[in-house]
Amino acid sequence: MPDLLIELFSEEIPARMQSRAREDLRKLVTDGLVAAGLTYRSAGAFSTPRRLTLTVEGLSAESPTTREERKGPRTDAPEAALQGFLRGAGLTRDDLVARDDKKGQVWFATIVKPGRPAAEIVAEVLDSTIRNFPWPKSMRWGAGSLRWVRPLHSIICILTDEAGARIVPLDIEGIRTGDTTRGHRFMAPDAFAVTGFDDYAARLRRARVMLDSAEREAAIRQEAANLAFARGWEIVPDDGLLSEIAGLVEWPVPLMGVIEDRFLALPPEVLQTSMKEHQKFLSARNPKTGRIEGFVTVANIDTPDHGDTILKGNQRVLAARLSDAAFFWENDLREAKSGMQDWEQGLKSVTFQSKLGSQADRITRIAALAREIAPLVGADPDMAEEAARIAKLDLRSAMVGEFPELQGTMGRYYALEAGKDAAVADAARDHYSPLGPSDAVPTAPVSVAVALADKLDTLTGFWAIDEKPTGSKDPFALRRAALGVVRLVLGNAIRISLSELMHTIGEVHLDFFFLRQREHFADSERQLVDAGFEKPDYAQKIKAFEKASFPEGTAFINALVAMEIDLLSFFHDRLKVFLKDQGIRHDVIDAVLNMPGNDDLTLLVNRATALSDFLKTDDGTNLLQGLKRAANILAQAEEKDGVEYSFGADPKYAETDQERALFAALGQAQPAISAAMQAEDFPAAMSAIAALRAPIDAFFDAVQINTDSQILRRNRLNLLSQIRAAGAAIADFNKIEG
């Protein structure tokens, strides 16, 4: 069984594209080979800045011969139908055989596809792969029509078996396959031939090319750590940057540099971001001072002076970059110390969204909502409002203009310089969080209040103007915002009514709408106020708009009402996604959604968690079947009889011990369940309903529900309704699968 080696050698491939390109090459080629009938033992893909490589081991020498029996038209079918079948199958009439079928005699044909050698299939698959490779961006060069991420120079495609290595012949736009490649651009630029993957990898290493990107990452990580350790420093972890650097070099040579003293007063985040974004440097931190005092740059070449010249050049460029950062920092500090009024005014001219106003308008809404949320999360309302008003002012700073990823981080520094309380400053930094599943959830009350207000304003605003996510499209990151609300609420065990909060911010949006549309009914403003527009009730506001003959206002209120319902459902969907990782099934969440308080996410999760744990026990599994059986029997009887059996079960009509035992068990369980649910002691409620398992099982084993006696039948059906009611007090067990 031969082994296959493919190398696509080109100009430098952008580092950000290499990981995806490796996987695409592996998938496209192996899927193509398998589709053509070949099998293989293993496949591995590799990349450097100048090459994509694929090795396939244990490839079939040829595809198998296949036989396919195809059914054609009836023997008495029109000639046109028969000729169409023959053309489609590539056959003649002599290839057909008539056989008896259910509908009479039918033509059958056996189509034989002979096997093909692996080389022929590999050539076809590689040609298709190269011509249709899914680069995010590609280019044409010269006079050809071939597109590649950068000009493609050469292609290795060889099959190696016991007889030796042979080139798979292929010509793509004048580029012929061969068995030669090149090493490092500067240290080993000459071409050399290879005979297989092991020979290829070994010769590349001698030619100063480290083929495996994971090996390059590990080498950079280890050497950078050694260099930092020698100075008493530590490398600031940044896996994304490390992966990018590994995609920029074929022979990594880490070099340690020192940041000039004049820049050490800059915030560490500024130093780290500037070096990362502009220079692709790893940051080195002094654990004793907490400051970033050095950096590691990764060269792509060994030099006689051990990198001194490279390092000096990098330090000159870094000094220029950090000088710009220092200039931004000093100017921003002056504005912060003066109160940030210019930034506040500047945000009035920054549009957030055409229908939702400017960033300044948005800040006003967030501040109002943060004040409402503050008491619910244990924050001081004045501090929450103040934090909301300054949290986004750093968007006008020069530093954030240069490095947008520092928004919030710089806001904290500027708030402290402005003399704000530490909790207010921290909220400026934390209110964007959590940004993703790995981002920490703020816990400080003021930060939580502003973070919730920020995300809820975004969600309610875009919902009100009907800019909701559709399919995979979510240009305003609304799913992330909703998941952020879920994580903030659950991470801090906050007891909060999302419906009430959405109504509150809906009123804020309505006031904002009124102000923006005031010119349309300026003459009726007093009429609006007199009609009750200032009252919090939406119905009064609708009457006011109708009296002022402004239907757009009524439409906006109706959109807000629909928003409150639809957005709550959206939160429930995000909650299911979040809890899936916690081991709680979506059907368990569905089972508790119909219970009171389903807009309180913490309450909802507590119920779902207790129910999930209960269903994992034997009692839970068996009781679920009993509850479902009772519900099914009741549903059938109620549909047949046209009545609802929900009242009147009387122990005096019980004929069997099992009936009497079930009456007694329900008499004890129902008050216990009710008290536990009232106290939100959900484990106790599960324990109380678990006591019904044995009596219910015994009842169904011994008692016939649909007896000939109508009195006994009604009594037993009403008894089943008590079982249904006991379950319904906890959850809708019909929603649970199994």
Image (cartoon, rainbow, N blue to C red):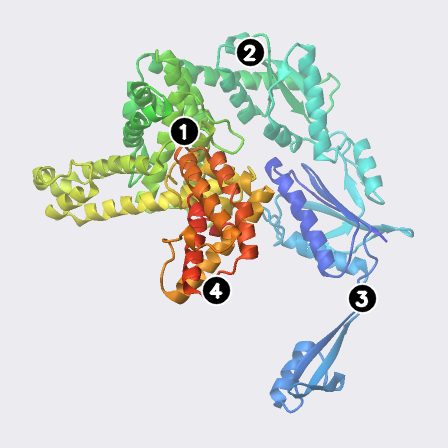
Mark toward the viewer: 3 or 2: 2
Q: Provide the residue designation for mark 4.
A: 707
Do tag 2 and tag 1 residues touch (Cβ < 8 Å)? no
Picture disc at residue 115: 3
Picture disc at residue 290: 2
User: Which one is nearer the viewer's eye here, 418 or 562?
Assistant: 562
N-term-proximal mark, 1 vs 3: 3
Instruction: Please state if 351 lies on the left or on the right of 4 as rendered.
Output: left
Residue 562 location (% of width, % of height): 30, 47
Q: Is residue 336 above or below residue 30?
A: above
Q: Provide the residue designation for mark 1.
A: 494
Mark toward the viewer: 3 or 4: 4
N-term-proximal mark, 2 vs 1: 2
Q: CA distance from mark 2 to mark 4?
A: 81 Å
The amino acid pointed to by label 4 is Thr
How crowded pointer 3 is (Cα within 10 Å; few <14, some 14-19, many 20+) is rated as some
SS assignment at label 2: loop
Picture disc at residue 590: none
Q: Does residue 137 appear anywhere in the picture? A: no
User: Which one is nearer the viewer's eye here, 79 or 434?
Assistant: 434
